[in-house]
């Protein structure tokens, strides 16, 4: 299928939201759409899961049930679901680790310089989302946020778009490369 045909198939896809599957429905849709939004996308970028993701897009018979898919159960097999509602960022991280698209990178490094040497203080994972913390006093949307008041740390709860390029001394790689 062409990229345009895959986009159209995704636009026509309807999900069944049994229980509280909205986190998975949203994560799968966003990952597929983000990949298909790249002009030079090829299905091969989805690696081994390409056939399963294409199968999702070929579904035309009623509502698609993610929780009825073997790949979904493999992804969440070791997930601690005792708290009831699942977290979309945690599932997104599992999903992106599974698909491992070459165009995706959440990698970041915080560097510091001593004399003439640059050292990496800490870093993130290629597929781990970031959480941006803003000091409570700066949460007024009408105020400009000074860059030195932002703190970036790895977190399993919130995913932020590719517009985070650099915050203070922290370099953040765009989420989707090659766009």
Image: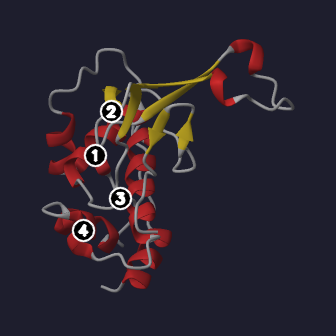
- Numbered disc in front, either 4 or 2: 2
Q: In which quarter of the image is the N terminus?
A: bottom left
- Residue labelled with disc 2: 124
* Viewer-closest of 16 and 54: 54
User: Residue 177 location in percent, x, y?
Assistant: 40, 61
- Residue labelled with disc 4: 45
In the rendered view, how is the structure colored? Answer: secondary structure
Q: In which quarter of the image is residue 3?
A: bottom left
Give the Cα separation between the discs numbered 2 and 3.
34 Å
As drawn, 174 above or below 171: below
Which label number is shown at residue 95? 1
As drawn, 178 above or below 140: below
Give the Cα separation between the discs numbered 1 and 4.
14 Å
**SS for dot 2:** loop
* Residue at 36% in and 31% down: 116
Which label number is shown at residue 64? 3
Give the Cα separation between the discs numbered 4 and 3.
23 Å
**SS for dot 4:** helix
Give the Cα separation between the discs numbered 4 and 2.
22 Å
Tell me if label 4 and label 2 are in contact, CB under 8 Å. no
Q: Quadrant of residue 104?
A: bottom left
């Amino acid at each position: 299928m062409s990229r345009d045909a895959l986009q159209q198939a995704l636009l026509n896809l309807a999900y069944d939201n049994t229980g509280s599957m909205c986190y998975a429905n949203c994560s799968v849709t966003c990952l597929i759409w983000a990949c298909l939004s790249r002009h030079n996308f090829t299905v091969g970028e989805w690696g081994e899961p390409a056939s399963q993701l294409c199968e999702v897009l070929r579904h035309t018979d009623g509502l698609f049930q993610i929780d009825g898919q073997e790949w979904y159960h493999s992804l969440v097999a070791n997930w601690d679901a005792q708290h009831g509602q699942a977290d979309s960022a945690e599932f997104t991280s599992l999903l992106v680790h599974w698909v491992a698209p070459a165009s995706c990178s959440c990698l970041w490094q915080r560097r510091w310089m001593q004399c003439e040497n640059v050292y990496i203080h800490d870093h993130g994972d290629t597929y781990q989302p970031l959480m941006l913390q803003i000091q409570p006093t700066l949460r007024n949307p009408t105020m400009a946020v000074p860059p030195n008041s932002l703190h970036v740390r790895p977190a399993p709860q919130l995913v932020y778009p590719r517009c985070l390029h650099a915050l203070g001394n922290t370099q953040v790689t765009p989420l989707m490369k090659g766009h």
